[in-house]
Image: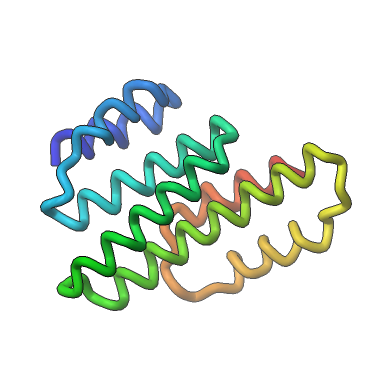
Amino acid sequence: MINLSYSKLFLAKNDFKKSKDFADKISFRDYLHYIGAKKILARIAYEEDDLDKIISINDAARKFFVSHEEIPKVYRISAIGYFEKIIQLSKLKEKFSLNEKIDFEINDFRKNLEGNKDDISFKEWFLEKVNKIK
């Protein structure tokens, strides 16, 4: 719990190296802490433009869920939705950097976030990042 707290603290300060160091120390014994760390690492990978790392983190989280059936379905759906959103956001960012027209995709992404009544982790962060792309 302490490592997760420090990781969140350094992430808030945009000190990605220290945040990663603490997130990497988090054990997978408590699924809340483990998935929390994976979410942080995915955000850092996004900031570092590392789509491969985001996909790797997503795969690791999915495998973790398969091997831990005791995790509530609602938590699984929320976490998987988060990872899918960050992959989608990363692909939008990549397309934008290649000068592709993505106005429709950006607006669709934003509308989906704003209109979604489900609790999406880091919803404000996603909105901030998609607005920066445009």
Q: Say above or below: 26 vs 60.
A: above
At horizontal 72% and vertical 66% (from top left) the residue drawn is 108
Residue 23 relative to residue 41: left or right: left
Q: Residue at x 22, y 39 (%)?
A: 4
Q: Is residue 106 left or right of residue 54?
A: right
Task: Judge left or right: residue 5 versus residue 111.
Answer: left
Number of numbered discs visible in the structure rendering? 0
Quadrant in which residue 46 is drawn? top right
**Residue 68, located in which quarter of the rendered image?**
bottom left
Position of residue 26 measured from the top left corner of the image (x, y, whole percent): 19, 39
The one nearer the camera, 14 or 92, is 92
Q: Quadrant of the N terminus?
A: top left
- Name the residue: 40% across, 32% down: 12
Q: Which quarter of the rendered picture does the C terminus lie within?
A: top right
Point out residue 8 in the picture as x, y percentages from the top left corner: 31, 36
Identify the residue shown where x is 55% and y is 30%. 48
Question: Residue 121's spot in the image, x, y percent?
Answer: 41, 57
Q: Position of residue 77 (x, y in %)?
A: 38, 72
Q: Quadrant of residue 7?
A: top left
